[in-house]
Structures are given as C-alpha cells and as structure tokens.
C-alpha cells in the first residue's frame, strides 16, 4: 500500500548514503541498566531487515534511538546522511516512522481518524490529500469501518492496527516496526506482510516470529545483551542451529525450513 | 471525559446556543452572573426573573429542565457557611419551627443560596453547550497566553491518561483478590495516589514522545474553525443586557 | 454530593460584586506575570510535566476525604505544584484547574473565579513554595526530609489560603455573619483539611522522588540536567526545532 | 510447574460440576458496542481449551467476565458451581487467575517481587510459603534475577513474563491466559508451553498462534462477532479450511499440519 495516491515524496536517496547508519552506539538507562554496547549497523536504502533477539536484548532501546527519542550515551545515529541531533530532529522524524511496541503509547486522539491524520497534518499535508492518505492507511489495516470510534475503546488487535495506520499515513522513507504482528489475527498478519512487501521503503522490523522474518526480510540482525551478534541473510541465520540456540532463538513447533 | 471531545456535563446538540462561539458564551455567562451578584438580596422577584431568563436559554438550547435540576442538585455548593448562618448570625432573632434564627443570618443564607444556585445554573448552561475543544479555542480568542493554553491542552489530554492508568491499577488489584474497601484507608490511598502519579507521568511522557515522533511542534494542527461574527456577539449579549436591566431595577426598588 | 463541601471553591454570591471585580483584576495581573516568569522554567520538555501536574490536581480534587461527619474536603494542590514545578508554573497550573472547573464543571462560581484564583493559585502556591524553600536544606538531605517538608508546606499553604477567604469576606462579605465567626470556621476546617492535604502531598512527592528525583523542582540545582528515566522512551531530545 | 512446594490447595473439584459454565451470556460496552451475544460454553475440570477468533471477536470481553471484572448484561457465568456475582466475587477470583492481554493492566507494585507476592498475600498465604511461591513463579518464567527491579523499567517481553508470574504464584484452579505468548522470545514461548503442560489445572487460553493452540490445547473454541461459531478438537478445527477462512484464521507461512 502506498498511503497516498501520488508518490508525493519518493525516497530520492543518494545510493552512496546509507539509509540508516548506526555507529558505535552505547546507551544506559538512568537507573544504570546498560542496554546497548557499541552497536554498529548500516542499512541501505530499500533494504528490509529483521531485528531478532531474546527478551531484554536491547531491540526496543535501539529502535528508540533512531529518531532521537532516546539520546545515545556514546556513538551516533545518522539517517540518510543527517545526524540524529537537535537541529535535525524534525526532519529525521519526518523520514523515520516508528510503530511502538505498545499501541497505547501511540494513540491519543479522540477518534481513530484524527489519530491517523495527526502525523501527516503535522508534516503539512492538508485537505483532500490528507483525507486520501487517512482513508488509504485505514483501508490497508482493515480499520476503515471503525474510523469514528475512540481508540481507547478498541480491542487489543484493533489498537495495534490503528497504531500501524498512524505511521503508514505519514508515508516515511524509513519504516521501523517494533513487533508489528503481535496481537494481530492470522489473516491480518498476512495482510500486513503483503502491505509491507508492497511498500518501496527501507524497513527495519523487530520480531520474535522467525518465519515472519524469513517471509518479509532478506536480511536479519541478531541482538543479544546489547550487542549485535549475527548479521546476514535470514535463511542462512535460521539454518544455523548453534547460533540460534545460543541466543534463545528457535524455529517454532511444526515449522519446517523448506 | 474524552480528550478534547466532550466532558461529563456536555449535552450533545446543534442548537443556536451550541453553535455560538465559546468566547461569546463565556463573556455572556460571566456578565450575567455579575449582574446576579450585584442584585440586592431583598429584591426577591429579580431572582425569579433570572431563573426565567435562564429557562428561556434552556428552551433555545433544548436542555430539559429536569436534566438541569438534577445536575444543579449534585453540583450546587451547599456551603457550610450558608447552612450555619441562620444560627450563628447576629441579633435580632425570630422563631421558626421551634428554632431561633437570626434575621440577618437568614437573609445572608438566602443571598448565598440564591446567587450561588443561579451561578451554578449559568455555569451548567455554559458547560452543557460547550465541548472542551471549543472552550480552548474560546480562551485562545480571549487572548489567554499561549503557554497557558499549551498546559491546558496537555492537561485535558493527560486527564484521560490518568483515568486510564487509575483504571488499570484498580483492575490489577481486584483481579488478584484485593478488597477495594481497604483503599479508603488514608495511607493506602495516599500511596496509591503516589504511584498513580508516577505511572501517569511515565505513560504521558511516552505518549508525548510519540506525538513528537509524528512531527508535533506544540500546537495542534489548525482545524479551521470559522471566525466569530458580530451578530453572534449581539445574540449572546442579549442575555446579560436583560440581566442588567433586572439588576438595575432591583437596586432602584429596594 | 450529600456531604458538605467545605473546601475552598467559593461560589457566586459570597462576596459582593465590587470585591469580586477587584480580586479578578489582581488575579489577572498576577497570572499574566506568572505566564511571563514561567517561560524561564518551562521548555518543550517540561511542558508535559506541567500538563500532567495540572491534570493530576484536577483528578485528585474529585476524591473527597472526610473531615467531620457530613463534611469533606479535597486537595488544593498549592504546595504540591510548587514543589514539583516551581511557583510560577504552579500558579498557572492551579489557575487552569480552577478555570476549567468553573467553566466546564460548574464548580466554583464564575464571578468568584478571581477570589478563588487569588486564594488557591496565588496565596496557596506561593505560601507552599515559601515554606518549602525555607526547608530546602532538610528536603535535600534525605527522602524523609523531603516528605516532612512536603507535609508541612501543604499544611501551612491550606491554612494560610483559607485566610485569603477571610480577608475577602472582611472586605466585601455579602452574608450576615461576623468576620470573627468566619475566621474561626474557616481556619478550623482548613486545619483539618490541611492534614489530608499534607498526607497526599507528602505521598505524591515521596513517590516521585523515589523513582524520578529529576522531576522535583525543589531538588533541582541551578541549570536543570535532563535526566528522565521511565520505561520506554526516556531521556533525549524531546524538544523540536 | 506448581508454584508452591506442597500441593496446598488441590482443585478438589466435584467431577459433576463444570469448572467453568457460561450460560447465554450477553454483553454490551457502555458506549453501545455489543461484544457478546448469547455465549454458551462449558469447560470440565482439567480441560485445556484454546479460544480462537479474529481481532475484535469478543475474546477478551469473554475472558473479563470470568472473574466478574465485567458484569454481563444478560446470562450468567458459573465457576465450579459458584455464580460470578457479588457475594462470591472474592472466592471466584481466588479460583480463576487471569493473565491480561496487556501486562500494564497487571503490574503496579514498586518491585517485581512485591507484584508477584501481591496475589497470594491477598489470598492469605504468608511467610515461607509466600517466599517459596514467589521464587517458584519467577523461576518458571525466567525472571528470578530481575526480582528487585521496578516492573515499569523492564522490556516488553520481560513485563509479559512477570505478568504471567503474578498469576502463577496465586496457583488458581482455573488459569485464563489472554495471548500469553505475544512479545515472548521463541524459547520463552516454548518454556511457557512446558510450564502450562506441567500444570494440572483447567486452562483457557486466547491465542492467535494456531500451532501453539494445537500444541497445548486438545480442544478449541472459535469466537466471531461475539458468538461461538465452532467448538471441537483442535486438530479437526485446524483441518477445516472453510471454517478457518470464514473467520479470518489460517495456518501460518511454512507450517504443515503433520
Ligand atoms: N525504562 C527503562 N529503565 C531501565 N531499564 C530498562 C528500561 N527499559 C528497558 N530496560 C532494560 O534494558 C534492557 C533492554 O530492554 P529493551 O526494551 O530494549 O529489550 P527488547 O530487546 O526490546 O526486549 P523485548 O523483546 O522483551 O521487547 C533490558 O534489560 C531491560 O530490562
Ligand atoms: N472498552 C470498550 N468499549 C467499547 N467497545 C469495546 C471496548 N473494548 C472492546 N470493545 C469492542 O468490543 C468488541 C470485542 O472486543 P474484544 O476486546 O473482546 O476483542 P478480542 O476478541 O479480544 O480482539 P483482539 O484479538 O483484537 O484482542 C470489539 O468490537 C471492540 O471494538
Ligand atoms: Mg522490545
Ligand atoms: Mg483481546
């Protein structure tokens, strides 16, 4: 799905510049928990990458650095050539759209429609184009019929879908999704995969669903203990039993790597 | 209360009164109550006049008088002072139903109850016809400083966050066998309030950061509400004009 | 409410029209000054804190605590906001609460707004702040010190704010009670309310200081270092260009 | 796992009495959304049942009726012979332990340990037994090392695990889990399955993970539009393509029903 009718803001990226470049990133939470140790990660424009790893590995922490919600204690993040720092924040946030792990952190407007319109309206989209984008995003996640309800009064999976729509409607160049498929019913999960495969955008997706990662992302990165411990083609990583076992990963019951 | 949408006292409607801009209604309500307050307490009939005036507004706004009466009963400030005045007021005193009441005290109590109740009814009329979002816009047009409006906007948003977190905490407790009656113990209530604050703050902070992630710069995208026209001011100010006439007549006749 | 609400939200008709107007003007001037001074304390990142404190005072005022049979009081919040966000921002917070309550919840009369703001948002906050400032040494020494400070500041703020009411009544009281009676009544009740106020303020400030000491304005040393924690998104560049 | 050392409160259920008996249950939310229409469901002691269905079907709404958190607008719920109504609520809540869909609805104490101890302490467990139960529950979800941290400052999956522990420590006769495996890493997901298979308790589990349902629950119930639309052996239901398709269910990519 392209959330708007015309490709108004194509990535237009210089192929020599990485879409996302994380360099020697360290981060400690104020209570002293060190969550990231020297993370290096380079993602090219248009790549689709899965971020895998056990609970508490630091995936969410890494994601929150990518548009300056958390500020590194060391190292830096560069988005399409622009360092994630004070003067560039607004532009970085226009480029990087993040779907948070918890939809309740994402939704706050009185109605679903207003929530989905909030992002593009802030980025200057108005009138018919705004309406079209909102419709398209809600259509893509199958929530069009609930547009006038309050996000507070939706089921868990419905809230997740609206959270996805709020970011799809911004049509960012880089889409970062933190466990987007959790709480979705099986068909919604597949439909989301189809939407994401149809987007011509850089994609970074955190997931615990290894088959889903294989389906969507040619490349995967494994994080554990705040470090990147593996990086390569998803199929090759999933075939590496020893590596998987060392980082609390395994293929689910009944799944066969064809 | 739904953020920015409505609030418990709002009565959905599309009447003339609902459609008036909020700043016009605020000014009209304030001036009307000022007239009520300025009316001498002995001008009993004038207070009946104010009540009729308000009743006319309710008719125009399609607010059932029963609805008004119920809300007024809940919201009316039965100030302790008013209840005690007839007993504690100065002499001379008179006998009523076996009680010895102060003349000045009883008049004073009537003064507070009559003016207080008319004030509550006026505020209720304003509240019933004005959603929160309009109120903020109205305050903005009344030149309230931007900083105050930002805080007020965030406050309305966070009221939902707090209500949500309070609901979650209650759920978490009772589902695991907590007896909510204990909550009324002062210490437990106080501790609960403390953790509610932290939870709400941290959730509110995350929501705020999520808003920033979607390009928020501190002001809501403009909704393009129409500007207020002179005729709307004229319609709304008819109310305080009649009230002023009542007040002046009251002053002259007593 | 079946119980009598003696907390300080004055209704219309308690003081006469000229007194209402005079205090209205005083309050508008002072709040205007606060809006100017608050800008120094408030950036894009602390604005949410002010919004939350305001919403919190608003929400907690809905909880009435019993004082005597048939009488209840509720939080005024002056010391609480002064300690958490400082006196200037605090004045704005309480003013907003009072305005919204008056306009949308019919709580506190429209013409009494000036006197209510004067008592609770100006006297209440600044007296609370003065006491807390005076005890800052103790507050910074330990958590218990902070809790004691919060309790005392809240208690004093409640009682002194009720004297504002007595002052207005003495100037333009429209009811037939002597100022002496009003003084005894108000101060007596508010000494009791002050205890409830003190407990809630102490517990809230204590809880905040335990997890997020960076949020307590009173404990802050000169230029504020952004140090939020919190589960998900925390510290960082919250502000936008 | 049995969260305490001695089997202090065995179910001791009369086999003639259903563990859970839902009769003609209707429910509408205050905003008017009708979420359940005449639901009938009987679960015998010791059964393990999966509750399947699309987003917004009414699964969570049904779950919240089982210990009286939501009160039916029509019909009733009977737990081990006891109607879920005012005088029995405390006893019903002792018997039915619910893990909510959102861990934030479950956690509220200052430390993980206190949160896990909260339930059993309310039900009268004290001293060494309490300590033992808390330890065992935290051990079972692999969170023992985080016992003294604040639940607010954990990762998403860590919070999910603690939420599970808070209910395991109550050792309820009937365990109701709303999407317990979401946000868990693959190994934690398998470990949870092992813990649940080891419990000799009645189990009702909401999930969108059909292979997981097959692995854990011999019986499944499908809900859609607030009604029960299928009820039978899990394997048979998962083989019924037409039924699955009609209710937005499907087996995931790469999974083969052996
Ligand atoms: N607000 C916080 N304060 C302190 N520590 C935190 C906070 N949030 C997370 N942590 C810790 O930081 C580490 C990394 O957490 P993070 O949320 O990034 O994990 P994750 O990889 O996203 O895990 P999950 O798969 O469970 O979501 C964990 O040890 C966690 O306990
Ligand atoms: N608090 C609420 N107020 C009003 N309607 C609600 C509320 N919560 C849920 N609903 C509605 O009730 C219906 C059932 O919701 P429920 O949460 O039970 O679904 P669910 O089957 O658990 O879905 P999911 O798989 O997405 O968690 C949905 O249409 C939903 O929009
Ligand atoms: Mg995470
Ligand atoms: Mg659900």
Image: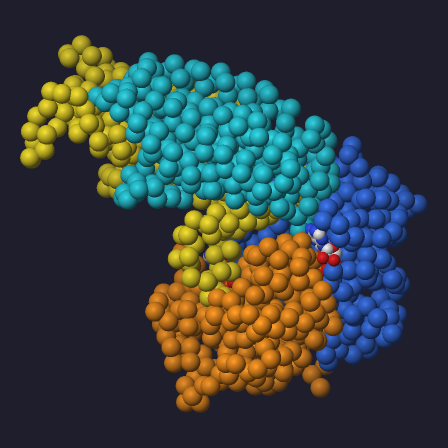
Chain colours: A blue, B yellow, C cyan, D orange
Foreground residue among B145 and C30: C30
Q: As drawn, is A20 to the left or to the right of B177? A: right
Q: Position of residue B174 (x, y in %)?
A: 46, 62
Q: Position of residue B81 (x, y in %)?
A: 26, 30
- Ligand 1 shows up in the quarter that is bottom right
Q: As drawn, is C106 to the left or to the right of A235? A: left
Quarter of the image for residue B118 reads: top left
Q: Is residue B6 above or below residue B178?
A: above
Quadrant location, the C terminus of chain D: bottom right
The residue sitting at 55% across, 49% down in the picture is B195
Furthest toward the bottom, the residue is D15
Tally of numbered discs: 0
The residue sitting at 49% across, 60% down in the picture is B173
Foreground residue among A97 and D250: A97
Q: Position of residue B116 (x, y in %)?
A: 27, 28
Quadrant location, the N terminus of chain D: bottom right
Foreground residue among C188 and D216: C188
Q: As drawn, is C150 to the left or to the right of D86? A: right
Q: Is residue A117 visible?
A: no
The residue sitting at 57% across, 46% down in the picture is C207
Furthest toward the right, the residue is A16
Q: Is residue D258 visible?
A: yes
Q: Is residue D50 above or below residue D69?
A: below
Q: Position of residue D2 (x, y in %)?
A: 60, 79
Furthest toward the top, the residue is B252
The residue sitting at 88% across, 47% down in the picture is A23
Q: Is residue D242 above or below residue B121?
A: below
Foreground residue among B65 and C209: C209
């Amino acid at each position: 799905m392209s959330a708007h009718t015309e490709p108004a803001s194509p990535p237009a990226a210089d192929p020599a510049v990485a879409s996302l470049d994380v360099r020697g990133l360290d981060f400690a939470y104020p209570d002293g928990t060190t969550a990231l140790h020297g993370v290096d990660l380079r993602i090219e424009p248009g790549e689709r990458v899965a971020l895998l790893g056990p609970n508490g590995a630091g995936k969410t922490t890494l994601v929150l650095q990518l548009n300056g919600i958390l500020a590194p204690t060391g190292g830096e993040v560069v988005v399409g050539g622009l360092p994630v720092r004070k003067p560039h924040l607004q532009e970085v946030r226009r480029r990087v759209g993040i779907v948070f792990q918890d939809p309740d952190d994402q939704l706050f407007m009185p109605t679903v429609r207003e929530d989905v319109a909030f992002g593009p309206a802030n980025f200057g989209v108005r009138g018919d184009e705004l309406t079209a984008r909102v419709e398209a995003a809600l259509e893509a996640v199958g929530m069009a019929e609930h547009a006038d309800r309050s996000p507070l009064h939706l089921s868990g999976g419905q809230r997740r879908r609206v959270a996805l729509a709020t970011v799809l409607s911004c049509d960012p160049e880089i889409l970062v999704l933190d466990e987007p498929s959790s709480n979705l019913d099986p068909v919604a999960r597949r439909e989301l995969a189809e939407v994401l495969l149809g987007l011509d955008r850089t994609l970074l997706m955190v997931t615990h669903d290894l088959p889903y990662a294989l389906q969507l992302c040619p490349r995967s990165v494994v994080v554990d203990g705040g470090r990147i411990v593996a990086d390569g083609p998803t199929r090759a990583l999933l075939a590496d039993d020893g590596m998987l076992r060392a980082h609390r990963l395994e293929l689910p019951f009944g799944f066969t790597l064809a | 209360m739904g953020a920015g949408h409505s609030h418990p006292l709002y009565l959905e409607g599309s009447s003339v009164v609902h459609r008036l801009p909020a700043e016009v209604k605020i000014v009209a309500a304030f001036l009307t109550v000022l007239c009520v307050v300025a009316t001498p307490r002995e001008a009993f009939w004038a207070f009946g006049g104010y009540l009729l005036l308000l009743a006319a507004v309710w008719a125009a706004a399609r607010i059932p008088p029963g609805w008004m009466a119920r809300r007024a009963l809940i919201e009316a400030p039965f100030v302790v002072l008013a209840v005690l005045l007839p007993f504690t007021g100065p002499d001379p005193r008179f006998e009523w139903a076996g009680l010895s009441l102060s003349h000045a005290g009883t008049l004073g109590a009537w003064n507070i109850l009559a003016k207080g109740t008319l004030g509550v009814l006026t505020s209720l009329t304003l509240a019933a016809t004005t959603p929160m979002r309009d109120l903020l816009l109205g305050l903005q047009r009344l030149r309230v400083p931007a900083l105050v409006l930002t805080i007020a906007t965030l406050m309305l948003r966070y009221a939902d966050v707090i209500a949500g977190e309070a609901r979650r905490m209650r759920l978490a407790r009772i589902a695991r066998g907590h007896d909510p009656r204990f909550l009324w113990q002062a210490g437990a209530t106080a501790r609960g309030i403390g953790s509610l604050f932290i939870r709400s703050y941290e959730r509110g902070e995350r929501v705020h950061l999520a808003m920033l992630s979607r390009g928020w710069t501190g002001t809501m995208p403009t909704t393009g509400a129409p500007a207020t026209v002179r005729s709307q001011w004229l319609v709304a100010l008819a109310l305080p004009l009649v009230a002023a006439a009542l007040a002046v007549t009251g002053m002259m006749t007593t | 409410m079946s119980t009598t609400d003696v907390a300080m939200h004055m209704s219309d008709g308690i003081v006469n029209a000229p007194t209402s107007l005079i205090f209205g003007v005083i309050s508008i001037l002072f709040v205007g000054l606060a809006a100017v001074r608050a800008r120094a304390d408030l950036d894009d990142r602390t604005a949410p804190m002010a919004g939350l404190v305001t919403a919190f005072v608003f929400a907690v005022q809905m909880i009435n605590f019993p004082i005597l049979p048939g009488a209840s009081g509720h939080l005024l919040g002056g010391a609480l906001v002064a300690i958490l966000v400082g006196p200037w921002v605090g004045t704005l917070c309480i003013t907003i609460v009072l305005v919204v309550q008056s306009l949308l919840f019919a709580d506190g009369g429209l013409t009494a707004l000036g006197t209510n703001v004067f008592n609770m948002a100006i006297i209440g906050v600044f007296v609370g702040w003065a006491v807390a400032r005076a005890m800052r040494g103790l507050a910074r020494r330990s958590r218990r010190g902070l809790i004691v400070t919060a309790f005392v500041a809240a208690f004093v703020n409640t009682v002194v704010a009720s004297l504002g009411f007595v002052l207005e009544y003495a100037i333009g009281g429209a009811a037939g009670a002597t100022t002496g009676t009003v003084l005894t009544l108000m101060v007596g009740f508010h000494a009791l309310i002050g205890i409830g106020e003190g407990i809630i303020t102490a517990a809230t400030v204590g809880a905040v200081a335990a997890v997020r000491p960076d949020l307590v304005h009173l404990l802050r040393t000169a230029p504020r270092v952004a140090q939020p924690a919190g589960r998900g998104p925390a510290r960082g560049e919250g502000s936008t260009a």
